[in-house]
Amino acid sequence: MSEFDIIRKYFSKSVVQKSMLGVGDDCALFTVPHGNEVAVSKDLLIEGKHFFSNVDPVSLGHKSLAVNLSDLAAMGAQPIGCLLGIAIPTVDHRWLSKFSKGFFKLSNEVACPLLGGDTVKSSSGISISITVFGAVPVSQAIRRNGAKLNDEIWISGNLGSADIAYRIITKQIMGSKSLLRRTIRALDWPNPRIHLGRCLLGIANSAIDISDGFLQDLSHITRSSNLGANIYYDEIPFDKYLEGKVSQEDIKKAILNGGDVYELCFTASKSNHNAIRKISNDTGIVLHMVGKMVSGKSIKISPHDRSILYDINGFNHF
Amino acid sequence: MSEFDIIRKYFSKSVVQKSMLGVGDDCALFTVPHGNEVAVSKDLLIEGKHFFSNVDPVSLGHKSLAVNLSDLAAMGAQPIGCLLGIAIPTVDHRWLSKFSKGFFKLSNEVACPLLGGDTVKSSSGISISITVFGAVPVSQAIRRNGAKLNDEIWISGNLGSADIAYRIITKQIMGSKSLLRRTIRALDWPNPRIHLGRCLLGIANSAIDISDGFLQDLSHITRSSNLGANIYYDEIPFDKYLEGKVSQEDIKKAILNGGDVYELCFTASKSNHNAIRKISNDTGIVLHMVGKMVSGKSIKISPHDRSILYDINGFNHF
C-alpha cells in the first residue's frame, strides 16, 4: 500500500469548505476571514514519550488533535484546519482506522478539517505531528506576555487527574482500578477549550494552556509579563474524589506540577470578574479564580506549607 | 537542558517581522497580505528513511526546509514562515548547532522565518517535521488538476543526479568517488524553486514538485487533470557528466523514477512558450519542454524503447 493509498483510505474524509483546498495537492489552501490573522501551532507526539504503545488508538487520534487545538484555544483563535504528519513502522489497518475515527470525530466537532499532511514509514515507533491553523481578530490574540499587575488568575476545569492516571500507569504511585478508570479520561480525552478561548477575547489579558504543569506554564506568563504571582492553593480546583485515594502530597504534586491537563490558565483585570463568572454560567465550564499577579519575579503559594512543592518542575522533555 | 532552553539557544534567531509573533507563545501569529490566501504544507523526515544517520547536519537543516519550500514553489506561493518540530534522542549541541545553521541560512535567503515549533525527546532516531506557510493571490495557486489538453510539459533544472548519489551511497550501483562528489550536491542541497513558482503564476496551468520521481509526480498531474501525457525522453534534462560513468539503464531509471529532485514539473499552453523562455532567461533557471498533455490516461514515452521503464515506480514510502 502506497502513501497515497493510505491518505485516500483513511484521511480524505474531512468536510472541506469551498474556500479550501484539502488533501491532494502540494499545499493545502485556505482563506482567512477579513480582519483576522492566522494563529498556527504544532505539537509532536512520540510513542513511548507522549503516549503509551498500548493506548487506545481512538483516544490517541482525539488527543493528538486536542493538544494542538488547546494552543489555539489559549490564544482565543477559531480553528480553520489542520495538517497531519504520521510516521508508522507498518501499515496496521485496524490501528489507522481507529486513530482516524478519534481524529475525525473531534475534527468535525470543532470544525477543524484535515487539509493535508504526510504519511511516512518509521524505522520504529509511531510519531504524530499535527499543525493547526486558526483565525483571530488582528491584534486581539490573547498572549502570554499581557498579564497586568493585580490581574486575577483563573483556571478552567480541574487539575491533577491526568497526572494521577499517568503515575498509576507508570507505577510511580499505587492506585485502585476504579481510581484509574476515574482519572484516565482526563489523560486520554482532554477537552480543548476552544469556545472558552473565544469568549475570553477582550476579557483576558494573558492566557496559556496547561500542558507542562500549572506552575511551569504559569511561569511562562509571569516571566514574559515581568511579574510574579500569588497562588491560593486552596482555591485550585481538582476532583475531590481523589482525596483519601492517594496521599495529600501526591495530590499537591499532581495539581501544581502535573502535565497533560489542557485546561486554560488566564489572567484578567478584577473589573472583568463578573464577566468571567457570566462566561462560566453561559458555557457551563467551571472557572476558578486561584490567585493574583503581583510585582516581583516569584510565584508564591499560600497558605505557606512546606509540604507544597515550590519548585517549578513540570513536564520536562529532556 | 529543558525544551525551552533548546528552543531559546538554537531556534530563536529568525528575523520575525512586526506583523508576526514568533517563537515563544502557544501559537505563532501572522497576517496574510490582502487578496491572498494561505498555502500550507508539511513534510516529515525520518532518520534512516529520508536521510542517513551520518548526513552532514548542516545540509540536513537546509534540506528539511527546502523540501517543504518546494511544495510552496509548486503552487506559486511566497513563503510567510515556518514551524519546526524536532524529535531527538539526546541533546547533541554540535548537531543542533550545525542543523540550525543550515536551516537558518535557507530560512533567511528565502525570507521564511521560523515562527515556532516543538522540540521533544525521541526514544530512538531523529524525526523532523516542518510546516511552511505561504501566500498566494486568491484563486491563482497553480494546482495539479489544472493541466489542459495540448499543454506543453516543462521541467526546471536537471533530473537524475540525486538518485544516482542515493544509489551509490546505498550500494545499489557502483560509482567513483568523483561521481559521488558530483551528484551528492543534488541529493543534499536541493534548491527550492520559489522564485520560479512565483513567475509561473498566470502562466502555468498545473505544477508539481518532483519529490517522488518524475513519472510518478507527473501521474498526479495527468490523473487529477483527466489527461494523459507524451514524454520526449531525449528532451529530459540531466547532467551529461553521468554518461559513461553509470549505465544508460541506470541513467534512465534515475531520470524517470528517481526521487528527491525538487525541481518543478509544470504544464502551460503553447501560447505561453515564449513567456516561459523569457522567464528562463530572466531567472537563469534552465527550463526544458519535455512533452505534451494528450487525451487518454497513460503516460507514453518516445522514442519507443523497451529499455525505458514504463512503470510508474517512484519513491514509495511503504
Image (cartoon, coloured by chain):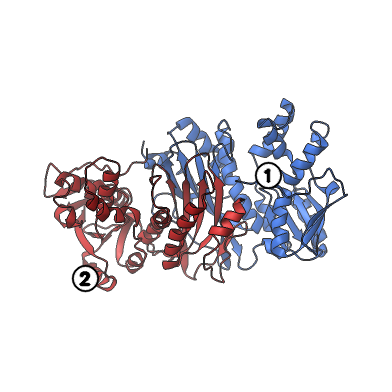
Chain colours: A red, B blue
Subunit bearing disc 1 = B
Q: Which residue is mark 1?
A: B259
Looking at the image, which residue is at 80% across and 51% down? B288
Q: In the figure, is residue B290 to the left or right of B47?
A: right
Looking at the image, which residue is at 13% across and 50% down? A244
Can residue B122 be seen at all in this image of the molecule? yes
State the residue in front, A153 or A9: A9
Looking at the image, which residue is at 76% across and 55% down? B279
Position of the C terminus of chain A, as image quadrant, is: top left
Q: How many marks?
A: 2
State the residue in front, A10 or A24: A10
Expressed as whole percent of the image width and height from the top left, the position of residue A176 reads 21, 48
Q: Are marks 1 and 2 on the same chain?
A: no
Q: In the figure, is residue B41 to the left or right of A167?
A: right
Residue A197: name its quadrant: bottom left
Residue A186: name its quadrant: bottom left
Q: In the figure, is residue A283 to the left or right of A36?
A: left
Q: Mark 2 is on which residue type?
A: Asn
Tell me the crowding category of disc 1: few under 14, some 14 to 19, or many 20 or more residues within 10 angstroms, Cα based.
Answer: many
Front label number (1 vs 2): 1
Tell me the crowding category of disc 2: few under 14, some 14 to 19, or many 20 or more residues within 10 angstroms, Cα based.
Answer: few
State the residue in front, A82 or B16: A82
Q: Residue furthest top?
A: B177
Q: Mark 1 is on which residue type?
A: Gly
State the residue in front, A78 or A206: A78
Q: Which residue is mark 2?
A: A274
Expressed as whole percent of the image width and height from the top left, the position of residue B135 reads 58, 60
